[in-house]
Image: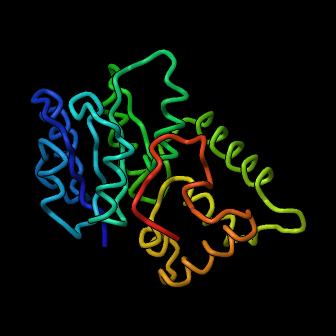
Amino acid sequence: MPLAIQAISSHPLLIRAIEEVLADAADFAVLPTASNEEEALSQRDISRLFLLDAFSLRTDLGAVVRRCRVYSPASKFLALLPPAEDNHLDKVQLFYCGIDGFVELHEAWQTELLLAIRSIVSGEYWVPDDVLRTFVEQTKALQDIQLLPGHSLAAREAQIVNLLARRLTNRAISKLLGISERTVKFHVSNILAKLGIEDRHALFPHNVGTSRGQTR
């Protein structure tokens, strides 16, 4: 089922600009803008591409992503960020937390927004190359450091580790990979055994926004 587009913002001018951009996108289903997270989550079990206004939300976007995925596991997230000269580390942390793309609100952001939406809906990321490189390097380094001697991860296990690194739940992983939650839980158990740890939250202790409330 195609993703519907829904912005979460309380900024009137930004809302109007987003609506103007989406008015030209006849191939997308567009839901009314939600002024806050609670209003957005009142519509449950609807997979969406959430456009998160980082300025008006004024909260941890990683936590917003986790809560939204409880009710909409297959949803994706695009963060609208204020322009900044050096926000590389912020973007890396947000990518770990499950953000699929970033658009900085510079002069040409409306044009970029539609490109970003099309990219994410089609299954790609809209993330700077240096952010992706940092994510891959850190994830690989952590795997290499933590694997017990004589153990290696199978291709599917390595794929799931990358999704766990982005704080995805078993339910979300099962939907993304087209496998059952039981199969995901089996793979997670094997991964933890090979890493010699008991809890999935210890996989990536250096990341921000660790999710609580789900065991392996």
* Quadrant in the picture for residue 212: bottom left
- Closer-to-camera residue (103/214): 214
| Identity of the residue drawn at 67% across and 40% down | 133
| Pick the front one: 116 or 41 | 41
- Residue at x-position 20% and y-position 43%: 8
Q: 211 or 32, which lies in front?
A: 211
Q: How is the image coloured?
A: rainbow
Location of residue 170 in the rendering, given as x and y in whole percent from the top left corner: 47, 71
Q: Position of residue 88 (x, y in %)?
A: 54, 27
The tally of labels here is 0
For residue 22, side relative to residue 112 (left or right) = left
Residue 97, position as x, y percentages in the image: 46, 47
Taking the spot 57% from the left edge, 61% from the top edge, the residue there is: 200
Q: In screen coordinates, is 124 left or right of 7?
A: right
Image check: 35 left or right of 190? Answer: left
Residue 148 pos. (x, y %)? 82, 62
Residue at 30% in and 55% down = 67
Q: Quadrant of residue 56?
A: top left
